Image (cartoon, helix red, strand yellow):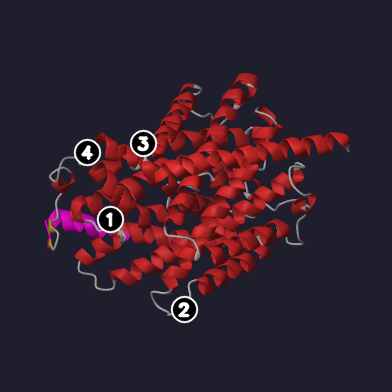
Amino acid sequence: MELKRDLKNRHVQLIAIGGTIGTGLFLGSGKAIALAGPSIILAYLIVGVALFFVMRALGELLLSNAGYKTFTDFATEYIGPWAGYITGWTYWFCWIMTAMADVIAVGMYIQYWFDVPQWVPALICVVLLLCLNLLTVKIFGELEFWFSIIKVVTIIALIVIGLYMIVTGMQTEAGTVRVSNLWEHGGFFANGIGGFLLAFQMVIFAFVGVELVGVAAAETANPKKNIPSAINKIPFRILLFYIGALFVILAINPWNTIDVDSSPFVQVFALAGIPIAAGIINFVVMTSAASAGNSGMFSTSRMLYNLGLNNQASKSFAKLNRRSVPQNGLIVSAIVVSLGALLSKLMPEDAFSLVTTISAICFIWVWSIILISHIIYKKKNRALHKASTFKAPFTPFVNYAVLVFFLFLLGVMLYAEATRTALLLTPFWFIMLAILYQFRRKKAMKS
C-alpha cells in the first residue's frame, strides 16, 4: 500500500498559499515593524526572493525522480544517509515546535469569546485535527483550502480598504493616510541598518512552511504540472500578501504608532471605522493558527512515514491504514504536540520566543540542505538537469548566494541578544541526532 495522490491542483495551490501566509504576518509583523520601521517591507522582499530560489531548487529535484517522496530522499542520495536522517528528524522537530505554539495560540484566541482554560480548546483542536487527518489526505487538502481562503480574503479586504483610504487621503486617529508615511517618520530605515537586520529572524519565521509543497509531493495528483504551477506563483503571492499588506498597513498607520502587542491588522481595520475589527481578526488569526497546526500534523506524520520507509525510524511509522494515511506517525505526533500544549502553560513567557527562534534556525538547515543537494545533483546528473522541464534558474551561483545569506542571518542571530540563547542551544539538537545516527548505523551493520 502506498500514499494516495488525492491532492488536486486547487489543494496544492492553497497549500502553497497557506505555506507563505502564516501567523508571522498576522501576529509577528507588529514586532518586526517596531524593529525595522518601514524597511521591514524590504526584509520580507529579500527573504521572499531567497526562498523562491530554494523552492525552485526543491521543485527541480522532486520532479527529477518520481520515487522521491520528500526532500529527505534526495538529501540521502546526494549528500548521504546522515543528511537524510538529520534533516528528516530536524524537520519533524521544527513542525512539532511550531504546532505546539499554534495549538496553544488557538486556545488563547478562543478565550476572546469563551472563559475556558486555554489548554482545553488547545487539546480539542489537536484531537479534532488528528481525527480529520486520519480519514484521508483529501480531508487535509480541504481543510488547508478553506483555512487559506479565509486568510486570502482577509488580506485582500485589508488591501482594498487600505488603497481606498490612501486614494481618498482619509483622516484617522493616526493622522492622514498617505504613502509618504513610509518615509516621513524617521526615514525608510527609521531604526538604522541594525534594526533592519534584527527583524530578519521574525521574517524568516513568517515564511516557515513555504516548503510544504515538497512534503505533499508524494500525494499530489499530476505533480509535474501542479508543483511547478504552485512554486511559480510564489513571487506573486509574496508581492500581494506580504509586500502589499505591509505597504497598506504602514501607509495607514505610521510605523511608530503601531502597538507591538496588538495585530497591525486589527489596528488598521479599527482605524478604517470597522467596530468589529478585533473579533474579525481574532477569528482569522485563530484559523491561521489552526491551519499551521493542521500543516504540522500533516508534515510530521509524513516525515515519520518517510523515515520509517528508509530505516531511519521505527518500521511501524511506515505502515498506512486502510485509507492510505500514516496513522502511527499521526498519532505519535499528536501525542507529542498535546504534551507540549499541556506543559507550555507552565513555561515563562520568553519560552515562545525561544521555541520560534530554534524553529527558524532548524528551517534554515532544511532549506540549506535543499540548496546543497541541488548543487550536487547538477554536478552529478548534468544530462538529467539538461532534460529537466523545470530548471532552477541561475544555478549554482544563486544557490551559493542564498547559502551565504543564510550564514549571514545566523551571524545576526548570534549578535542579537534576543536570539543568541536559542542559536547557542540549537547545536545540541544536531549533536544528539549525530550520535543517534551513528548508534543506529552501527546497530544496522551488526544485524
- Dot placed on the residue nearer the N-terminal end, 4 or 1: 1
The alpha-carbon separation of the residues under discs 4 and 3 comes to 15 Å
Where does the magenta region start and end? 157-171
**As drawn, is 8 to the left or to the right of 42?**
right
Along the viewing direction, whichever of 370 and 147 lies nearer the viewer: 370
Three-letter residue code for mark 2: Val
Percent x, y of residue 386: 59, 22
Q: CA distance from mark 3 to mark 2?
A: 41 Å
- Mark 4 or 3: in front is 4
Q: Amino acid at mark 1?
A: Ile
Cα distance between the residues tagged 4 and 1? 23 Å
Q: Earlier in the sequence, mark 4 or mark 3?
A: 3
Residue at 36%, 57% (x, y): give it. Answer: 27
The residue to which callout 4 is attached is 189
Precedes in sequence: disc 3 or disc 2: 3
84 to 208, vertically: above or below: above
Secondary structure beneath dot 3 equals: helix
Q: Which residue is mark 1?
A: 159
* Place of residue 184 in the rendered image (x, y in percent of width and height, measured from the top left): 12, 44
Q: Spatial distance from mark 4 to mark 2, Cα to Cα? A: 43 Å
First in sequence: mark 1 vs mark 3: 3
Name the one closer to the observer, 391 or 24: 24
How crowded pointer 1 is (Cα within 10 Å; few <14, some 14-19, many 20+) is rated as many
CA gap, disc 1 to disc 3?
21 Å
The spot of residue 399 in percent (x, y) is 49, 27
Instruction: Name the residue beneath numbered marker 3.
Output: 46
Which of the two marks, 4 or 1, is nearer to us in this view?
4
- As drawn, the label of residue 116 is 2
